[in-house]
Amino acid sequence: MDQTAGQVDGVAFAEGGVTGCGQRYQEQTDACLAALKARADGDKAKPAECAGIKRSDYVDMVMSVAIDDLEWTDEDGRFDKNKMLDSLTEDGN
């Protein structure tokens, strides 16, 4: 999978939630996403709140949090390709 496509999927997940899943699972994903956002910098451990979350949903949430932390999202929380490209070229690399 193209990395950018995966990142866009992650942002879409965070914005739209889990489609076609029960209310209980949605509550679990909400708790997992909140726990991921609250992790200390550099913490790579899977939060306990994420137990029982489908791997693909968990990966989407991790990517969504990473994109947001890198400030690659627009004012609506959507992935912004231009912000990503700008951040990669700001320091001359």
Image: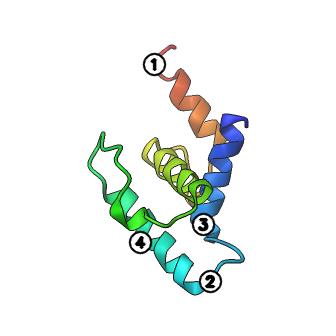
- Label 1 or label 3, whichever lies nearer to me, is 3
Q: Earlier in the sequence, mark 1 or mark 4?
A: 4
Which residue matches tag 2? Answer: 22
Q: Is residue 92 above or below residue 66?
A: above
Q: Earlier in the sequence, mark 4 or mark 3?
A: 3
Q: Amino acid at mark 4?
A: Ala
Q: Which mark is residue 15?
A: 3
Q: What residue sits 43% from the left and 64% below the top?
A: 51
Residues tagged 1 and 3 counted as in contact (Cβ below 8 A): no
- Label 1 or label 4, whichever lies nearer to me, is 4
Q: Secondary structure at mark 3?
A: helix
Q: Secondary structure at mark 4?
A: helix
Q: Earlier in the sequence, mark 2 or mark 1?
A: 2
Q: Position of residue 38 (x, y in %)?
A: 31, 59
Q: Secondary structure at mark 2?
A: loop
Q: Nearer the viewer, residue 88 or 19?
A: 19
Which residue matches tag 1? Answer: 91
Q: Nearer the viewer, residue 19 or 75?
A: 19
C-alpha distance separating marks 4 and 3: 14 Å
C-alpha distance separating marks 1 and 4: 36 Å
